[in-house]
Image (spheres, rainbow, N blue to C red):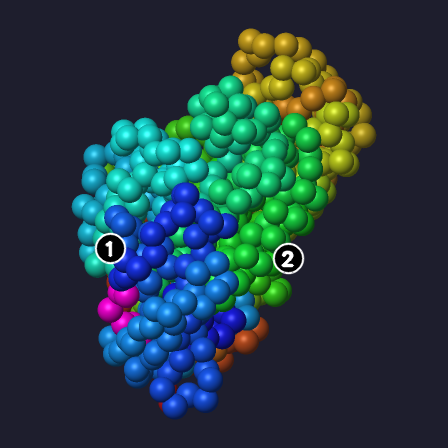
Amino acid sequence: MLIDAYIKPPAIAYKAKTVAIREFAPVGNPYDASQNDIRLVVTKNGAGGFQLSFPAYFDGGTWKVNVVAPSKGTYRGYFYRNGQKTKVQVTVSAVEPITGYVFKEGTKFRLTDGKLGAPYWPVGHNLAWQGGEYKFREQMDLMKANGLNWTRIWACHWDNRNPYWPTSFPKPKDGEFAPEVLRRLDETIAAAELTGLKFQFVLFHHGQVSTDVNPNWSDHPWNKKNGGFLSTATEFFTNPEAIKRQRNFIRYAIARWGSSPSIMAWELFNEVQFTEAIRKGGDWKTVAKWHDDMATYIRSLDPCRLITTSSELGQPIWSRMDYKQGHGYPSSILGFVMGTPADAKLPLFHGEIGWGDSGHSDREAIRDGIWGAFFAGHSGAAQFWYWDQMNKPGMYGEYKRSIGILKSLGDPMSFQRQKIAVNSLKGATLQLVPGRGWEKSDVMTFDLPADAESVGQLSGFFQGTGHREMQPNPVSIKFTAEKPGEASINVAEFATGGSKAQVFLDGKEVFTKEWKGQGNKAESIRIPYAAGPHVLRIENNGPDWFRVRSIDIPGIMPVSSAMLASNGDKSVIRINSAVGDGNTATCTITHAKWNDGVYDTKIFDMSSGREFNTTTTIKGGAIKIDNLSSDVLVVLTRRAR
């Protein structure tokens, strides 16, 4: 690993051959750094005392060290054992150039590339464990062939990637690592390097220490019921022996694999909000301290590799993380992604997205994850979770098309969302699809259709009195209907604790119903209205929640809606139109900063994959676009005068 500067490594690093020695017989557990802290400290010839320190790792009776230096040359030094300098001296030549490490610069990611740092905008899908039709390496090859540059891999026991807890390999001695798991991780990282993928190395996941969300605690080897040392799953974050073993794994991972440029980041936890400590105790303070302490420990060994975790973005666990990473499974992926503001200080992107309801197109999920993040100004795409579905027709083609467009644009983060006016015929149904899952609602009042995009900040879980802090106000919707119609509030599910829906139209209660216990079926609440202005208010005055899939109001929405981002030289427009098969739409888009003139125009029909090259004349800051299908991307480049 690089020991040079915090976060930003040199443009080119230099790797030496792996140092291997047998001089030190392990005392007790060779994987326990409190018993066997073996390090190599080297100084470059003529460097005036400039030192690099590297932890060693135990592998088949041998201590090994990966030396990666910030400058080419010969380095000499000594091994230290448990803090004491030994007589074992080595000389290494760091001559093999390495590039491709990911670092952050403000809210952007960059790659060490021998120069100032090429922009890196992560786009890919998860590959957490072996599953589905493709084998790991086969799927990585497909990802490479279609331009994907990011993935996420878990150290999970069921896939034999947790060294403490293999399921198909011999069980190691208590506190030690299974060598077969370590070799399996070697193969995983080598495959990522060969395919050029960067990945987040997920060290721990919520199921390990959960009894109700993807629970694995009953099988955990640290559980006292299984002969372990933890009485409860919550002790994972505080028990000294647990902390020591966690650090032993982290230290070993840094020593053995930290030199790989394919590891974008150490991800401390997958969805820590679902651990027992949070679900049952709400103890964010303890979990935040654990994150802070682990980040400090990692940086004492590997000050250049990025560190992240995955959880709710508003919790106090991010102070020592290098970037933020949320997950979401909403009814509207576009609404969810667009409803997540970019962070002013740290890079941010969603590491997992997928549909919260069945019946949607996975290809649309991929597309909305990529382009929603682009227009929201995120530091990477919102990454599709279901890698086991990538064998379906057109899935990788969806990536290839969007990635090709992104490459033609240059740095995605050089584009900024711009205000525009869209002139389109009305008549479409406005479908408000809440963009958040089990999270706090930040927006509960909507003036339609202008505020339709803000629905990404509304949770689909309409809370009752039990969690009023998550939704302190009723949902209020203001709209004007040109003719009579009927709104639909589509309720997907109900909490067993009981809920009570009350709906008011223009201040008058027009619907009320209570749901109690189990066995409630999804239903649609229909509210007729006359022509004219209205305010629709939805309350939950029961003890628990009900989940709303969507609120549909016919006839008040323009047929076409659009968003625009520009970097000064190019403008990118995404236009969605409520048209059926074989039908098209027309709209006019006005942008105050457009200069009149002729623009080279590329039109991408994102649904069919067709592309068109043409020219467009902008006059009065406006452009008219005809023959629109349901999902179109337009790239405008002004011709030189």
Residue 280 shown in magenta: no
Asked if residue 529 lies left or right of residue 397, the reply is right
- Please tell me whether residue 210 is drawn above or below residue 520 in the rendered image: below
Residue neighbourhood size for the residue with mark 1, other residues' Cα within 10 Å, grouped as few (<14), some (14–19), many (≥20): some
Residue placed furthest toward the right: 507
Q: Which residues are magenta?
A: 12-19
In the picture, the quarter occupied by the C terminus is bottom left
Q: Residue at x 21, y 39 (%)?
A: 134
Q: Position of residue 390 (x, y in %)?
A: 27, 40
Q: Is residue 370 visible?
A: no
- Please tell me whether residue 212 is drawn above or below residue 60 in the rendered image: above
- Please tell me whether residue 223 is drawn above or below residue 32 in the rendered image: above
Residue placed under numbered mark 2 in the picture: 319
Residue placed under numbered mark 1 in the picture: 190
Q: Is residue 512 visible?
A: yes
Closer to the observer: label 1 or label 2?
A: 1
Q: Position of residue 474 (x, y in %)?
A: 75, 33
**Amino acid carrying mark 2 in the image:** Ser
Return the disc, 1 or 2, that comes first in the chain's sequence: 1
Q: Position of residue 83 (x, y in %)?
A: 50, 63
Disc 1 is placed on an element classified as: helix
Q: Position of residue 515 (x, y in %)?
A: 66, 13
Q: CA separation, marks 1 and 2?
A: 32 Å
Q: Residue at x 65, y 28 (%)?
A: 280
* Most foreground residue, 217 or 390: 217
Q: Are marks 1 and 2 in contact (CB under 8 Å)?
A: no
In the picture, the quarter occupied by the N terminus is bottom left
- Please tell me whether residue 344 is drawn above or below residue 547 in the rendered image: below
**Amino acid carrying mark 1 in the image:** Ala
